[in-house]
Image (cartoon, grey):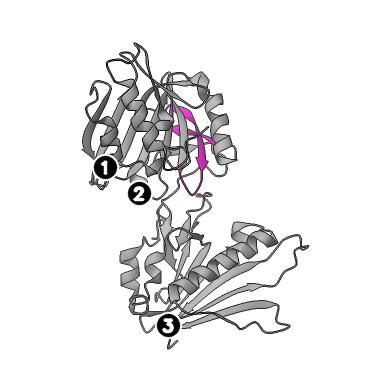
């Protein structure tokens, strides 16, 4: 059974102490799951790891310091099996030859690499990950610089991206924080061929919270927006986060998918990742942002959603908007219009949350849920 969040560090400390004392048995055991909870691996920090490794044999566990591709400093921990020390993972006791943990300069983990000693363990590992994610992996191939290609398996969730691929005689498993810059995530930057539909280059999620700073939003210029987010150019550059819909830059459109060559949409989030967004339009009047429409659910983009799940999303969105604006909403639905509307009137922003009426018996569910924001004078 996986350790619950909050107890994995204690388990880690106890196991490290138990595995490295003079009284320990000749063959020591180390549980990879004790270092990080597979349900929340990035809760483990460098500081916590330092405490766990304090005074331990550096021939088994050692730190190195380097730079990421972005140029920012990082710390890398290597934990190796051997010399009477063995690492194991999952209840199936898969032999682990090495664990590599990557930490940002602020001590937050962003990637963990686990090397399994045998490729034959892949099916067991895949079964464990299917149970964790509740879904099967997508499969494709990674093309290497020397022309060779090797298979790759991938799982995606809001919590993490997990990738497994063959590395010589070993199987390498990577757990990556989805919010970490793309340039530091191997092998996402590799050229991938022969893909399943969801297995292509995926950019880091787009955090839209800076657009909810109402002290600054209504003075935002097109130039300001381009300095905050990556604009799509004529070369359809991978990693673009928004595009201008007109040459005068009067409207910006954020989308998780700008090209058919990138079938895996880039996630966009609001309210500290609590709410996902399908699409965003920002309208500029006299060179300043004046209105913004955020599509929280669009059936043509995010698919069919059932009534109870939709109502939960609607309630969550309304709660988050009300908390942000600090005022209570008013029901402005018009009888017979088939549109449900709630508005918030705050000193710095007017907000409208709306969706189409629907019946639980309808086969396709509601069509949309939109949040519209406007400057008080607009």
Do callouts 3 and 2 mark residues in contact (Cβ within 8 Å)? no
The stretch in magenta equals 138-160
> Which residue carries the number 1 mark?
68
Residue under the point 49% across and 72% down: 321
Q: For the stretch drawn in magenta, what is the main secondary structure? A: strand
Disc 1 packing (10 Å; few <14; some 14–19; many ≥20): some
Report x, y in % for residue 6: 41, 43
Q: Quadrant of residue 51?
A: top left
Mark 3 and mark 2 lie on one chain; the one further toward the N terminus is 2
Quadrant into which the C terminus falls: bottom left
Q: Answer whether residue 153 is magenta in the image.
A: yes
Q: From this viewpoint, which residue is outermost toward the top? A: 26
92 shown above or below 41: above
> Which residue carries the number 3 mark?
375
Residue under the point 33% across and 79% down: 219
User: What secondary structure is marked by label 1?
Assistant: loop
176 shown above or below 336: above
Distance of label 3 from label 2 (alpha carbons): 32 Å
Mark 2 and mark 1 lie on one chain; the one further toward the N terminus is 1
288 shown above or below 54: below
Q: Which mark is residue 181?
A: 2
Residue under the point 40% across and 65% down: 209
Disc 2 packing (10 Å; few <14; some 14–19; many ≥20): some
């Amino acid at each position: 059974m996986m350790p619950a969040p909050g107890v994995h560090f204690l388990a880690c400390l106890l196991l490290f102490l138990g595995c490295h004392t003079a009284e320990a048995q000749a063959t020591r055991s180390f549980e990879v799951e004790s270092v990080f909870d597979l349900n929340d691996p990035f809760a483990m920090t460098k500081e916590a790891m330092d405490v766990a490794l304090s005074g331990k044999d550096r021939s088994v566990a050692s730190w190195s310091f380097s730079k990421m591709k972005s140029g920012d400093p990082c710390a890398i921990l290597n934990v190796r099996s051997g010399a009477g020390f063995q690492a194991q993972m999952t209840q199936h006791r898969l032999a682990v030859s090495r664990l590599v943990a990557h930490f940002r300069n602020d001590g937050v983990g962003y990637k963990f690499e686990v090397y399994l000693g045998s490729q034959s363990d892949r099916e067991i590992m895949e079964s464990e990950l299917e149970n964790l994610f509740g879904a099967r992996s997508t499969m494709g191939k990674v093309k290497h610089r020397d022309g060779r290609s090797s298979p790759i398996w991938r799982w995606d969730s809001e919590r993490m991206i997990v990738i497994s691929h063959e590395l010589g005689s070993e199987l390498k498993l990577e757990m990556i924080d989805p919010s970490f810059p793309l340039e530091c995530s191997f092998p996402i930057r590799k050229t991938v061929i022969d893909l399943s539909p969801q297995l292509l280059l995926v950019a880091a999620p787009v955090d839209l919270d800076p657009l909810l700073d109402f002290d600054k939003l209504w003075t935002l210029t097109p130039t300001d927006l381009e300095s905050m987010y990556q604009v799509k150019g004529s070369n359809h550059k991978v990693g673009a986060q928004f595009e201008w819909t007109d040459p005068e830059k009067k409207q910006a459109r954020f989308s998780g998918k700008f090209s058919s060559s990138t079938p895996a949409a880039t996630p966009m989030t609001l309210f500290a990742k609590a709410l996902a967004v399908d699409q965003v339009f920002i309208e500029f009047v006299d060179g300043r942002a004046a209105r913004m429409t955020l599509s929280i659910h669009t059936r043509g983009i995010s698919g069919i959603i059932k009534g109870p799940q939709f109502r939960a999303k609607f309630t969550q969105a309304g709660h988050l908007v009300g908390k942000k604006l600090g005022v209570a909403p008013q029901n402005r639905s018009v009888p017979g219009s088939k549109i449900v509307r709630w508005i918030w009137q705050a000193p710095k922003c007017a907000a409208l949350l709306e969706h189409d009426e629907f019946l639980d018996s309808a086969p396709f569910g509601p069509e949309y849920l939109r949040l519209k924001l406007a400057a008080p004078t607009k």
